[in-house]
Amino acid sequence: SRQNPQGWGIAYYDDNKAIVVRPPVGEPYIAADSPLFSDTIKKARSTNIIAHVRTASGATDVCELNCHPFKYRYHERDWIFAHNGYVMNRNFERDPDAEGSTDSETIFHKMMRYVDGHMSSGSIRGLYPAIKKAVRQILDDYPGIKLNFLMSDGNMYYAFSHYDVKPMYIQRNMKGYGNAVLLSTQAFGGGNWEEIPVDRL
């Protein structure tokens, strides 16, 4: 977190409701220095968890609303999303429903609207193919985008890697309570980390 000092966030599920904790005003933005961060990692018990430490691109403010993960309500479910990357587009417009000013949150909103459009039209059957098509549309909308993300609706956990110089990794572990899958932008702490294939959801 000291290499990514501009904020942190943790999202997890409690009774199918997404709990998103990010540093409010007055709380340290470096996760290692934050009592709230320490308390939250002790409380976060969920099938799906997303945590993020932020390095601001310079174009957006350092504040709670710009910290990942972000939440989006879709079809009576809370979706959570964290992004590693950036959009290289001078004409990029912030989504009007986004709370913060990051390109990441706008990408999330736009992608979920694409998913909704595909599911509502009946042109695509199933959430997974709808998300795949939505991701392809985002890549077409923003040529040169650097897009790594983690996303969940509480039941499923999605990972996508499209940032050639910053790969994502997966590690599958057997724990006392069952299987556990870790996803990360760094292969840390030992173990058998595998690089996630590029452009595969």
Image (tube, grey):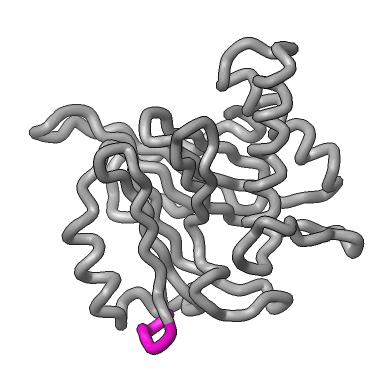
Main SS, magenta residues: loop
The C terminus: image quadrant: top right
Based on the displayed image, in which of its 4 quarters is residue 42 positioned?
bottom left
Q: Give the residue furthest to the left.
A: 176
Q: Position of residue 21 (x, y in %)?
A: 36, 64
- Whether residue 26 is in magenta: the answer is yes
Based on the displayed image, in which of its 4 quarters is residue 2 positioned?
bottom left
Q: In the shown orientation, is residue 2 left or right of residue 137?
A: left
Q: Give the residue furthest to the bottom.
A: 26
Residue positioned 43% across, 49% down in the render: 184
In this orientation, which residue lies closer to the viewer: 71 or 84? 71
Location of residue 199 with respect to 31 vertically, above or below = above
Q: Position of residue 168 (x, y in %)?
A: 52, 45
- Whether residue 13 is in magenta: the answer is no
The answer to whether one can see residue 156 in this image is yes
Magenta stretch in the rendered image: 25-29
Location of residue 178 with respect to 38 vertically, above or below = above
Residue positioned 48% across, 56% down in the render: 69
Location of residue 158 with respect to 162 vertically, above or below = above
